[in-house]
Image (cartoon, grey):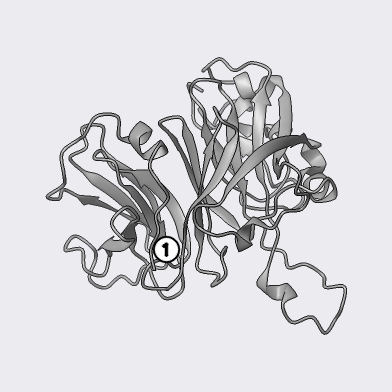
Amino acid sequence: MGTWITCEESRTTDHGYCFDPRDRENELSRTPIRDMGFFSHEACDVDPSTGIVYLTEDDSRLPIPEDPADETAAESRTSFLYRYLPEDPRPRPGALQQGGRLQALAIAGRPSCNLDLGSTGDRYAVVWEDVRPEQAHEDALAVGCARFNRLEGSLFAGGAFWFDDTAGGEQRLGQIFRYLPRDNQLELFLEGSSAAQMESPDNMTITPWGDLWFVEDGGGSQRVVESRRAARRTCSPRTASSAPRTATPTELAGPTFAPDGKTFFVNLYDPGHTLAVTGPLQSRRGDAGRRLAAASPVSVT
């Protein structure tokens, strides 16, 4: 969009919006983009071919069980996936403030489908339901949009939108989804079956050679994981030689590669450090994002 967007992971009075903070001193930076919704935002990414913005929701509120004796209610929260269709899709600062439509993802013919109970390789035909920006979560729930547990990181690359549910799946270890706008199809790319394989996926990136890497923020694991290689651990701040030896990281975030693909960057949320990993790393291989967008789902036991 010719700028950058920051999201508030909150839903309180006057907080729960996206902003265009290009210049912290101007009025535009201080004005919430209200049409992009009032909810507990986590991440957003833009489809460069259309200007459509995809947004994940990390709603940590527990549902109120109809039966007070229902002990399973606390195991499943409800979050939704949204997209914002801006009136002005041009890549320039302030364009998103010109208004647009907010929609939530639903599964054709399956109202209120609970996707955090899906299986790796499942595919779904998608429909998008209009929701009111100020009542986005409530409207999505009311019209039967697809339910996730807690959505976290996302990435748009090679014509595919990737996102993860940090607590989805039968074992509550996490899931990674792939949405293909061209086909309007959603696919469950990978579901965690053991803590050794995946535990609470968060931000993600695609390597220059075509693997999907994601970081974890689970209580028992903070790793960078390579999903295309049997979801094996790639590196950990506890073993990285450049990590502060006295630090006890609580969360990894923001994995990304330098434009030349020769350096991998990842952040330690606490104590607030950024690590630069120089490898050895594999060489770039063509359009890695597009090849991964067409790859088969990962099947790991």
Q: Which of 235 and 237 is in front in this view?
A: 235
Q: Residue furthest left?
A: 280
Residue 284 coordinates in the image, percent (x, y): 20, 35
Residue receiving disc 1: 251
Give the vertical position of 55 relative to 224 (above or below).
above
Quarter location, residue 30 = top right
Q: Residue furthest right?
A: 66
Query: What's the residue type where badge 1 is placed?
Result: Glu
Give the vertical position of 1 relative to 124 (above or below).
above
Q: Residue furthest bottom?
A: 69
Give the vertical position of 71 relative to 221 (above or below).
below
- Residue, x 30% and y 35% (percent of image)? 288
Residue 192 coordinates in the image, percent (x, y): 46, 65
- Residue, x 72% and y 22% (percent of image)? 99
Answer left or right for 99 relative to 249.
right
- Residue, x 29% and y 63% (percent of image)? 232
- Residue 200 in view of the camera: yes
- Residue 252 in view of the camera: no
Residue 230 coordinates in the image, percent (x, y): 31, 61
- Residue, x 49% and y 25% (percent of image)? 3
Residue 129 coordinates in the image, percent (x, y): 76, 36
Is disc 1 placed on a helix, strand or loop? loop
Q: Give the mark count.
A: 1
Q: Which of 98 and 245 is in front in this view?
A: 98
